[in-house]
Image (tube, rainbow, N blue to C red):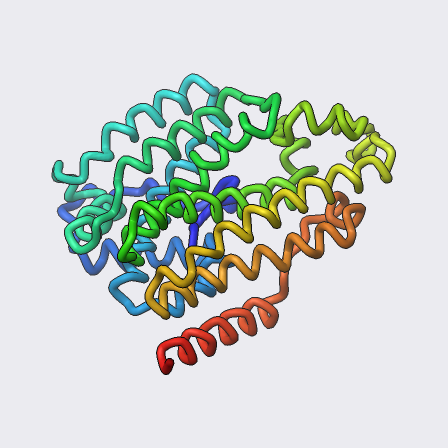
Amino acid sequence: MLIRTPRLRRRPGNTSSRDETGPVGVDDAYRLCEQIMRTQARNFSYGLRLLPAPKRRALSAIYALARRIDDIADGNAPAGQRQARLSALRATLDVTAPAPHDPVLVALRDATHRYPIPIEAFADLIDGCTADVHGTTYRTFEDLLGYCKCVAGSIGRLSLGVFGTADVRAATPLADALGVALQITNILRDLREDRLAGRVYLPERDLRRFGCTLVIDERGRFADPPDRLAALVRFEADRARGWFATGTRLLPMLDPRSAACTATMALIYRRLLDRISADPAGALAARLSLTTREKTMVAVGALAQAGRGRGR
């Protein structure tokens, strides 16, 4: 589940192109969104392949708009221009208004007619991305938690609208929790990349606790003592594991295919988290990822488990 972040992560893509020659058909709009998903959300695409086509298409539309928001925030334009573009995009969230030349909005509008997607969650995503534009830092974990719920929990809530559940009220905070777990994992995976870009997500209180500054030296490496950095990373990884434990309580509340999709994405990130925790120095030196074969095996295992669940 949870199509994102921290955010969708930065493979530049054309998610804002619009066909100015005439209205876009629904099928063509979905095809573009699915192409964006396949090329720019590789971790999440393994889980989405397990869904029936209508749900997969709807989630691709959600991802495509989320990606557009993320690309604006991560763009090279001055902060004021990015802020203005995010504000303008917020005005497009009314999916009842026609947008016939915009493939992403055409697909999303159709998806909202088919599923109870909480479109207002995109406003939370925009709030989180706006914080990135401003270079917001976080004093405590509670501060960071609000950001995580904006940029990743929002995607969980949007996805839940497509997956469906008998108890939305109970399922929603679990979707948020899984988003928080994925987000913390992303933050740890991209710690050096974000720092080189001038961003620090880890709470100031945690940095002080472990005696770390995250200062980058002239060689592009962290200047903090390796043992302190390792302790910091493992502390945050343990925190993420707690959120994974809470978030995966969502799985029994979903239908088997949606549960398999969610489990695939959660397990891919959980394995990545375990590797980061096992080798913090390696994770800080290079961006870690699972191999294609490993991700495929996770998906196959999740689908098999879903089949066994259906048979009971």
Q: Quadrant of the N terminus?
A: bottom left
Residue 290 falls in which quadrant of the image? bottom right
Task: Please provide percent x and percent y for residue 168.
Answer: 29, 49
106 with respect to 270 (left or right): left
Against 282, residue 296 (above or below) is below
> Above or below — where is 306 with respect to 11?
below
Q: Nearer the viewer, residue 14 or 45?
A: 45
Q: Is residue 231 above or below residue 273?
A: above
Q: Residue at x 37, y 32 (%)?
A: 124
Q: Nearer the viewer, residue 162 or 252?
A: 252
Identify the residue at image location x=13%, y=39%: 96
Q: Position of residue 242 (x, y in %)?
A: 59, 47
Give whichever of 96, 155 is nearer the camera: 155
Residue drawn at x 58%, y 22% is 137
Count of number-bearing discs? 0
Tell me if residue 274 can be seen.
yes
